[in-house]
Image (cartoon, helix red, strand yellow):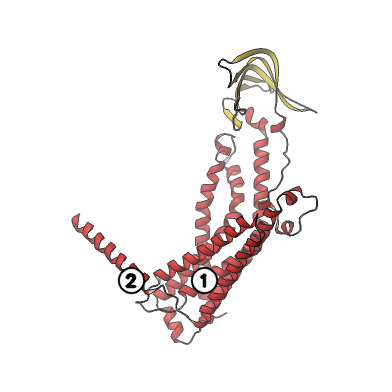
Amino acid sequence: MGLIDRYICRTTFGAFLLVLVSLTSIIWVTQALRDIDLLTNQGQTILTFVGITGMIVPLLVLVIAPIAVMIAVAYVLNRLSADSELIVMNASGMSPWRLFRPFLLVAVVVALLVAFISAYLAPQGLRQLRDWLSEVRADVVTYIVKPGQFTTIEKGLTFYIRERRISGQLLGIFLDDRRDPMEHVTVLAEEGEILKNDRGMFLLLQNGSVQRHEQSQRDPSIVVFDRYAFDLSRFSGTPVVSYTVRERYLWQLINPSPDDTLAKTQAGHFRAELHDRLLAPFYPIAFVIITYAFLGAPRTTRQSRGLSLVAAIGLVASLRLVGFASAVIGVHVPPVLAVQYVALIAAIGLGILAIGRGVIIEPPAFVTQLATILSERIAKRAGMLAAAR
């Protein structure tokens, strides 16, 4: 690898990592806020919160990496053009393929990264996320024995305990059950305790009352009790987790187990997910080829690179949209899955053809003229506003 190749690879990799980390961090924060109830309602530590929500990072990288490498290549090409390095390289006899080589190397490395994440790392992270969330939310005993806190075990079911003694006895118990839309149940008890046996786990309440208000009735009914058992079995223990299609490894999609019920009932989803995973590593390569085809050729200062960049972004977005749409529709219409293969092959093939011929891809003249007119009017309006101030 020559000096120019190392320089381009180093600059492109640096830009790629910066964009990837920035975009992933921003999107991770927005996704993590959906599980903020782990801190607010369920009393988990910040380390647990970060650990659980961090499991989605591989999936985010899988989606963002092709976009990040495209942005990195566009940035490096614009930088080379602004410093007139592209013109110098072209004048020295360097062919478009020679200059494209380091960018292609970066694309192949990113494609290998995406292939590993798609086949193993992303499903593994989603599996751990599901397992961890299930365990945290299933440990209901840990939550309800925290005195002085209203704790929502699940949507519509809230507990409150005034005090917990060293012996494990619970005092001042309040239970509000709104899970059934047709009936609202409120339980008050002076004391209670957790009982586990072969039949499950129960909250045994003493000296209290149960108020039931059915939607069809105007007034609630109140029953006073000496002893009352509330079943907590469904909230205790280690839950049995069934992994979704997105949480299956690549080899499980290729060759699912004959006893896999999900593979039988959702065969279309398995098929669409498999094709989407197989094509995932080719998107970084296609994006880099498209970007270089639009921006890699040297240009004069009169030839607009901005519109070419917009056209490259539009083509990349359209290509990925075709892939998403093909996977969604292909669940029910299998032949549609072939559309994403055709789109990728066409994009890569036409891009390679343009690079090999050194074609400068520019938008039509009327588009350039329209953009010039708009920019002049915007600049004129900005000048008038500045003068008015």
The single residue placed furthest to the bottom in the displayed view is: 93
Q: Residue at x 68, y 59 (%)?
A: 274
Whether residue 16 is visible, yes or no, is no
Along the line of sight, the residue nearer the viewer: 244 or 160 = 244
x%, y% of residue 242? 72, 45
**Circle 1: element type:** helix
Eyeballing the image, is 71 above or below 190?
A: below
Q: Amino acid at mark 1?
A: Ile
Res. 137 mark? none
Q: Amino acid at mark 2?
A: Gln
- Horizontal side of residue 169 vs 181, given as left or right: right
| Residue 16 x/y as whole percent | 52, 65
Return the x and y of residue 216 as percentages of the image width and height.
58, 20
- Say which residue appears at 60% left-offset and 51% top-offset: 56
- Numbered tag placed on residue 290 in the rendering: 1
Q: Mark 1 or mark 2: which is in front?
A: 2
Q: Quadrant of the N terminus?
A: bottom right
Q: Which mark is residue 369?
A: 2
Residue situated in front as seen by the camera: 243 or 94 = 243
Near-viewer residue (4 or 176) = 176
Q: Position of residue 319 (x, y in %)?
A: 54, 64
Residue lying at 19% horizontally and 58% vertically, measured from the top left: 387
Q: Counting residues from the N terminus, which is met first, the one under dot 1 or under dot 2? A: 1
| Quadrant of residue 198 within the rendered picture | top right
Is 117 above or below relative to 215? below
Q: In the drawing, does residue 98 fall left or right of residue 310?
A: right
